[in-house]
Image (spheres, rainbow, N blue to C red):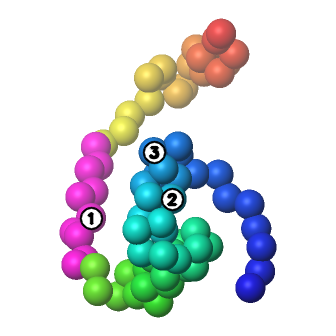
Amino acid sequence: MARTTVDLDASILKELKRRSASEGKTLGRLISELVAPALKDNGANRPEEPLDWAAQPMKARVPLEDKDAVYAALHAQ
């Protein structure tokens, strides 16, 4: 089995340790068992959520024919 380091929230690590002790499994074995189904699923069983796309017409904030106004807008801080 490969070894690695993973940063987990303290509350998640605490629960994983509690659960591994109660199930008599190593922490690595428990994490592998919990993660494997999520990787296998790959999102195939998740319901598709519709994309809520919002669009608004855009317009220039300065008169584009006024080169000084365009320059000022581009170089404003």
Q: Report the residue at 48% width, 68% height from top.
A: 20
In the image, residue 36 lies in the stretch drawn in magenta: no
> Label 3: how many residues lie within 10 Å, few (<14), some (14-19) or many (20+)?
few
Q: Which residue is mark 2?
A: 17
Quarter holding residue 74: top right
> Label 1 is placed on what type of residue?
Leu
- Where is residue 54 drawn, in percent x and y? 26, 50
Q: Nearer the viewer, mark 1 or mark 2?
A: 2
Q: Report the residue at 22% width, 78% height from top.
A: 47
Q: For marks 2 and 3, give the CA distance.
A: 10 Å
Q: Which residue is mark 3?
A: 11
Q: Which residues are magenta?
A: 47-56
51, 66: nearer the viewer: 51
Residue 22 versus residue 59 in the image, above or below: below
In the image, residue 55 lies in the stretch drawn in magenta: yes
> Label 2: how many residues lie within 10 Å, few (<14), some (14-19) or many (20+)?
some
Q: For marks 1 and 2, give the CA distance.
A: 38 Å
> Label 3 is placed on what type of residue?
Ser
Quarter holding residue 59: top left
> Label 2 is placed on what type of residue?
Lys
Residue 20 disc label? none
Q: Secondary structure at mark 3?
A: helix
Q: Which residue is mark 1?
A: 51
- Where is residue 37 drawn, in percent x and y? 43, 85
Q: Earlier in the sequence, mark 1 or mark 2?
A: 2
